Image (spheres, coloured by chain):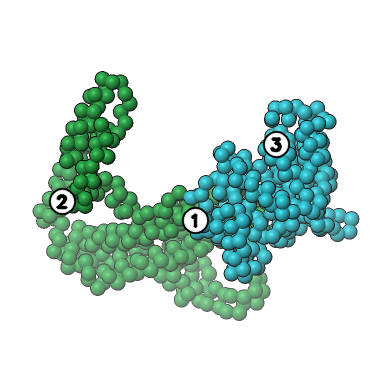
């Protein structure tokens, strides 16, 4: 489903990704752990081409993201074409980034209507169903800033789901939340995992990783250091850096 | 009744201080600002003096003022001023938005051209520019529409095409566009970049990102400055009186040139400038409230409603007046007493 190959990315002289390979199968839940600055978020942002790659490529369902193969080269796509590809890749931000001047319903309806040309009535019905799914059926007419952080993040997840993406990317979805609100967001993600949604999750919630992940990936210094089933990576890490990180995090 | 509660509370406080307990449930007396009262008194006396002078000083010549306030020639001049402002605003801000988008575009050429435009039109004094447009026929006798560097399909005589009025509109609008461009750009760059990123992550098309996501949020930053510009354009239209266009200020000058009543006629112009600026300010407040939806945790309210809410004494008095009628025993009830005791 998701195929990341030899991805390099530098900001100026800072080499953030130094050749990352990662494959995610359909229906699989992969959790990415790692210290700050290890390149987790940049990797996630490269997958939907919010960051341009310096080298390597990303494929979703066999389709190159951000580039087109022509002859022996990769040609960069125009922004319009990239936008069309992003419809298939849901992204949930750490700081939610809901549109504050639109109601919750309008937040959910906007992209399906403008990017997928779904009829407004259909999109609204779908929005209502999604809000019910994340437990916010009664908040459709509220403005985002009038909701709690946990509620806002649940709306943001529903907004990403409204496009019926092939894969969902979560960039530290609970890091901006008060501890008592983390649970409600994790519950929603857990439900999605049970429903067989393909997900890539960057998080610091190690307990949650153990519970929902089919596979845990540990990153450090722009590289994947270790990956495997959660019980292996979390309970019997092979690499010294993984052990050091886990001993601090737990 | 309420007095007895307070006395009880005071007694309770005394008892508490002896006991060294916490002062919960005691009534709160707002701080008294004696300095403010003195200042308010001084200001009121000065205001009274000013109003007294306006009424009693014959120099203001209120009779002439009222003679001309609604005179047809004045009203027609006022209408022309309003038109100049409207054209200047609409054309100026449309061009301004375009320039702002050019300056934010990825193309260095577009960025450069927009920057150059703003640089040029901010550098040239408005009055110089107006006279320049007024004398355009001196530079270009004819203007034509056709293929650049190729054949021309329509030709116009500049002298007929650019009269005094269109020269004025052109000058005001082009000048306004330079300032509007910077105001709009300022509004756009003040929007959280995460908004644009979220829209991009959702695959929303670019034009739509701008129209639906970025600009409505930018409006909050744009509006106060834009209103400033419109008000100053409205008053600034008086500058086109140099081209003998019969707008408000020019008309007033003509009248006092004839009858020599300078002060009352200037007051006529002042009156109308104030009235229209007030209307603009009211409109501004409404539009700003519209774009403030979703910003805070509560619905934005009109300024006068907020002012009412801030007058705590009136509603409290009203409530006190209502209370004995609506179930006096409950108000005097043990709950209050227990709370204080």
Chain label for disc 1: A
Picture residue at 58% right of the left edge, 75% below the top: B145
Picture residue at 67% right of the left edge, 51% below the top: A191
Question: Disc 1 designates what residue?
Answer: A142
Residue placed most toward the observer, B261 or A226:
A226
Q: Is mark 3 on a helix, strand or loop?
A: helix
Chain label for disc 2: B
Crowding near pointer 1: few (<14 within 10 Å), some, many (20+)?
Answer: some
From the rendered image, report the letter of the chain displayed in cyan: A
* Res A244 seen here: yes
Crowding near pointer 2: few (<14 within 10 Å), some, many (20+)?
Answer: few
Q: Describe residue B117's horizontal placement relative to residue B242 as left or right.
A: right
From the rendered image, report the letter of the chain displayed in green: B
Image coords of residue B112 (percent x, y): 62, 53
Question: Disc 2 designates what residue?
Answer: B51
Q: Tell me where residue B76 sits by quadrant.
A: bottom left
Compared with B326, B36 (above or below) is above
């Amino acid at each position: 489903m998701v195929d990341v190959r030899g991805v390099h990315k530098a900001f100026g002289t800072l080499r953030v990704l130094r050749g990352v390979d990662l494959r995610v199968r359909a229906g699989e839940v992969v959790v990415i752990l790692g210290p700050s600055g290890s390149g987790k978020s940049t990797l996630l942002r490269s997958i939907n081409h919010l960051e341009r790659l310096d080298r390597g490529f990303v494929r979703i369902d066999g389709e190159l993201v951000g580039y087109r193969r022509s002859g022996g080269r990769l040609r960069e796509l125009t922004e319009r074409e990239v936008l069309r590809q992003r419809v298939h890749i849901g992204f949930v931000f750490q700081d939610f980034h809901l549109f504050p001047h639109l109601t919750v319903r309008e937040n959910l309806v906007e992209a399906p209507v403008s990017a997928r040309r779904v009829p407004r009535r259909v999109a609204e019905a779908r929005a209502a169903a999604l809000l019910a799914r994340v437990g916010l059926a009664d908040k459709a007419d509220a403005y985002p800033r009038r909701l709690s952080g946990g509620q806002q993040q649940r709306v943001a997840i529903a907004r990403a789901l409204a496009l019926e993406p092939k894969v969902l990317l979560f960039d530290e979805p609970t890091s901006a939340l008060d501890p008592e609100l983390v649970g409600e967001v994790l519950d929603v993600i857990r439900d999605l995992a049970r429903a067989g949604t393909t997900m890539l999750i960057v998080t610091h919630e190690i307990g949650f990783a153990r519970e929902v992940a089919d596979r845990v990936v540990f990153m450090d210094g722009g590289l994947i250091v270790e990956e495997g089933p959660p019980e292996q990576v979390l309970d019997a890490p092979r690499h010294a850096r993984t052990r050091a990180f886990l001993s601090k995090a737990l | 009744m309420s007095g007895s509660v307070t006395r009880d509370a005071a007694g309770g406080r005394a008892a508490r201080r002896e006991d060294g307990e916490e002062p919960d449930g005691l009534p709160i007396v707002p701080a008294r600002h004696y300095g403010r009262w003195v200042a308010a008194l001084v200001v009121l006396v000065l205001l009274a003096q000013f109003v007294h002078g306006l009424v009693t000083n014959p120099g203001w010549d209120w009779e002439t003022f009222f003679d001309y306030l609604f005179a047809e020639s004045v009203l027609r001049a006022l209408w022309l001023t309003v038109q100049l402002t409207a054209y200047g605003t609409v054309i100026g801000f449309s061009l301004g938005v375009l320039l702002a988008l050019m300056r934010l575009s990825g193309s260095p050429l577009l960025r450069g051209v927009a920057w150059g435009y703003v640089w040029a039109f901010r550098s040239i004094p408005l009055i110089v520019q107006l006279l320049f447009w007024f004398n355009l026929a001196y530079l270009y006798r004819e203007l034509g529409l056709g293929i650049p560097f190729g054949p021309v399909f329509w030709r116009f005589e500049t002298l007929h095409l650019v009269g005094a009025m269109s020269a004025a509109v052109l000058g005001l609008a082009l000048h306004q566009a330079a300032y509007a461009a910077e105001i709009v750009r300022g509004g756009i760059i003040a929007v959280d970049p995460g908004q644009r990123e979220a829209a991009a992550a959702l695959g929303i098309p670019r034009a739509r990102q701008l129209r639906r996501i970025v600009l409505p949020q930018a409006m909050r930053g744009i509006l106060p400055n834009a209103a400033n510009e419109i008000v100053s354009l409205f008053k600034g239209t008086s500058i086109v009186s140099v081209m003998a266009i019969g707008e408000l200020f020019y008309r007033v000058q003509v009248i006092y040139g004839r009858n020599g009543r300078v002060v009352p006629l200037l007051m006529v112009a002042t009156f109308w400038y104030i009235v229209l600026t007030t209307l603009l300010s009211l409109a501004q407040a409404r539009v700003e409230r519209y774009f403030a939806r979703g910003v805070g945790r509560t619905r934005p309210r009109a300024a006068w409603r907020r002012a009412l809410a801030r007058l705590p004494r009136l509603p409290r008095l009203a409530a006190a007046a209502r209370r004995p009628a609506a179930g006096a025993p409950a108000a005097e009830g043990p709950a209050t007493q227990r709370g204080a005791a």
